[in-house]
Image (cartoon, rainbow, N blue to C red):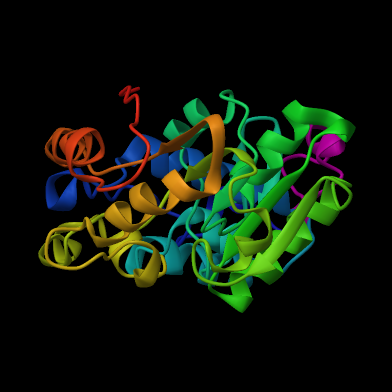
Amino acid sequence: MARLGQHPRFICCTTFVYLDNGPDSTLLRRELKWLVEDAIEEPENLDNNGGRVRLRVEIEGLYMLWKQRVEERRPFQYVVGCEHWRDLVLCVEEVVLIPRPETDLIVDLGLWADLGTGSGAIAIGIARVLGSGGRVIATDLSPAAIGVAAFNVQRYGLQDVVELRQGSWFEPLKDVEGKVSGFVSNPPYIPSANISGLQADVGRHEPRVALDNGINGIVDLLHLCKGTAFMLKPGGFFAFETNGEEQCKYLVEYMENDVADNPPFTVKRL
């Protein structure tokens, strides 16, 4: 039994906003509250125990987890091993990027292929929209990421809808060239020089291969733009995330004017 309010090291007053625009004290307190509440056995009886509770883990174990969060700036999702995204609870590990709220905008377009799937978040979201009659192929270069994605796909019983293939970008998709209705991707797009300026939670812990894309952050984006012209069936489309307005303008010009010998694109920015 423990009285959490009296433990001297469960203090949350640090803010990283002024350091690198990181989490403020309000968010940190909310995360700490979630961590502690999740560790309580029979929380429904809390009011009947005079403030004393039984924990599923030792309080020192909770302290060490929280220490990772505030001292190492380890993202809270990695600390607890999951992320709430859309109506899903996804397993996440440091071999995959943490799904972001803005990625939710892409899913509702109803795509059929997810390049660089990571945790499988987008592929699973698409599969739930398409239903049992749909098919989603999700690729990733990392065997570890494919393992995390497979766990999440099985968690939601979507093995018959989502097919996972290991390999780089379009390489695992040669058998469906010209047959894909749509692609979605959240590729690496951050210039190498900008990695050190990311929030510590991101730069120190999320997989660098999923963030860093060279001098201008655009190498993989150009590869994806060119490849989709061959992979899509007529009338198909491709939606992906970028690093902002400057990259968007460059890519729009590239797709409209510089993709030699490829069918023309109609480009829209979300």
Q: Is residue 159 above or below residue 100?
A: below
| Residue 261 x, y percent position in the rendering | 30, 47
Q: Quadrant of residue 21?
A: top left
- Residue 92 visible in the shown view: no
Q: Quadrant of residue 215?
A: bottom left
In the rendered image, which quarter contains the N terminus? Answer: bottom right
Comparing 46 with 172, the one in front is 172
- Residue ID at (75%, 48%): 52
Q: How many numbered discs?
A: 0
Left or right placement of residue 183 versus residue 41 in this view: left
Comparing 82 with 6, the one in front is 82
Q: Is residue 77 above or below residue 254?
A: below
Left or right placement of residue 56 versus residue 237 in this view: right
Instruction: Tell me where the magenta segment starts and ends, as one range.
Output: 40-54
- Residue 210 visible in the shown view: yes
Q: Quadrant of residue 34?
A: top right
Query: In the displayed image of the protein, which residue is found farthest to the bottom?
Result: 143
- Residue ID at (20%, 58%): 217
Q: Is residue 60 above or below residue 117?
A: below
Comparing 103 with 6, the one in front is 103
| Residue 208 x, y percent position in the rendering | 34, 70
In the rendered image, which quarter contains the C terminus? Answer: top left
Comparing 223 with 50, the one in front is 223
| Residue 128 x, y percent position in the rendering | 77, 32
Q: Is residue 138 magenta?
A: no
Q: Is residue 41 magenta?
A: yes
